[in-house]
Amino acid sequence: MYLHLFWIIALGAVALLWIYGAIDAARGVPALASLGDAAPLSDADCPSISVLFAARDEAEKLPAALKTFLAMDYPRYEVVAVNDRSEDGTEELLERAAQENPHMKVVCVKELPAGWLGKPHALQKAYEQSTGEWLVFTDADVQFAPSLLRSAISLAEKKGWDHLTLSGRTEMFTFGERIALTFFALAFLMSVRPWRVSDSRSRAFAGVGMFQLIRRSAYEKIGTHRRLAMEVVDDMKLGKLVKQAGFRSAMARAGDDVSVHWHSGVRNIIRGTTKNFFAFAEFSLWMVGTQIFGLIAMCIFPWLALPFVHGWALLFAGIAVGLAIILDIGVCVELRASPAYALTFPIGALIFVWMLVRSTIVTLWSGGITWRGTFYPLKELKRGVV
């Protein structure tokens, strides 16, 4: 009797949380702005923009990205690329592009100064060589549609935003990538709640590394990347600094206008996020424990309970599982994956839990993180958390 009551209470609480989340998403997702919500600006109304990115050993993916960066339908823009201590052909690719295209500038970093992570330092150097009234921070493996800058700046100026980050298309080629990334996208949606970012009364913030547009004046007032010198998740924390400073921030949907193939295969996704996940938890064991418990309780527990419960407990478990599937179907459709991948939801949750556990263990065991060949001690990383 007491065990059955436990199942009812526990699963009832989970079901209520899913109901609340589903209602919030049903109201919020349709309200998210899209790039097509604003008419493109005329050439005369386009402010100057600097596209900034760091590249370290990106010779494989860089050519495709550069081709799109340098083919923008925008009258006043520059691309400032930083070669961050690369040991492959990255520097040669960037220098050749600069010789062939007047939009391109290249900055070379030979040594990393103390007190900096490689990427924030490189982006700081890019900013210092830029001239645009607006800045776009992106990555060396991202691809832009020709109309992207014109559409993004038009939307930001129409809405009066100082900072705009975009969700784009994540290319997925394997079964494992689709399982992991569809769950990852839903987890981001339900935890960040991007529709709240533009609400000045909400503490919600967001920053996606694929694309962040920010007014130069706002960026300078929040302290530039010097404020993020030792911050691993610098993209999200840039959004946090903007929001904390009282500037207007928002997240919008870019569709196919921004795209990236993040990592090849689920194993590389897991390895590639080893540096990030414990950092997302601000290197706090308590926070990681809370996140793991929440994932298990919300995303795995109801599925495991289904065959063993009855009555009200079965109803509550069914509600939780059903709403998870419905929401995940929406994510799958958005990401152009088969809706059938919604049935892999608990597998994706298990992968996510393992990513959290692995990131925590590896970081603690090694006493820090290794990022692009450079080791950063945990003590310094903790002091740099924003």
Image (cartoon, helix red, strand yellow):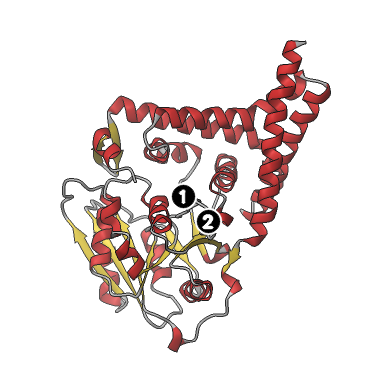
Q: Depth check: give the residue in front, 357 or 202.
A: 202
Question: Image check: 316 left or right of 270?
Answer: right
Q: Which mark is residue 236?
A: none
**Residue that carries the numbered disc 1 in the rendered image:** 262
Q: Residue at x 32, y 75 (%)?
A: 132
Q: Where is residue 356 in the image (x, y as percent from the top left)?
A: 46, 32
Q: Distance between the residues labelled 1 and 2?
A: 33 Å
Name, please, the residue furthest toward the top: 1
Q: Position of residue 307 (x, y in %)?
A: 76, 21
Q: Indicate the amino acid at tag 2.
A: Arg
Name, please, the residue furthest toward the right: 311
Up the image or down, 147 lies above or below 368; here it is: below
Name, please, the residue furthest toward the front: 201
**Residue that carries the numbered disc 2 in the rendered image:** 201
Q: Position of residue 52 (x, y in %)?
A: 33, 65
Up the image or down, 322 lies above or below 193; here it is: above
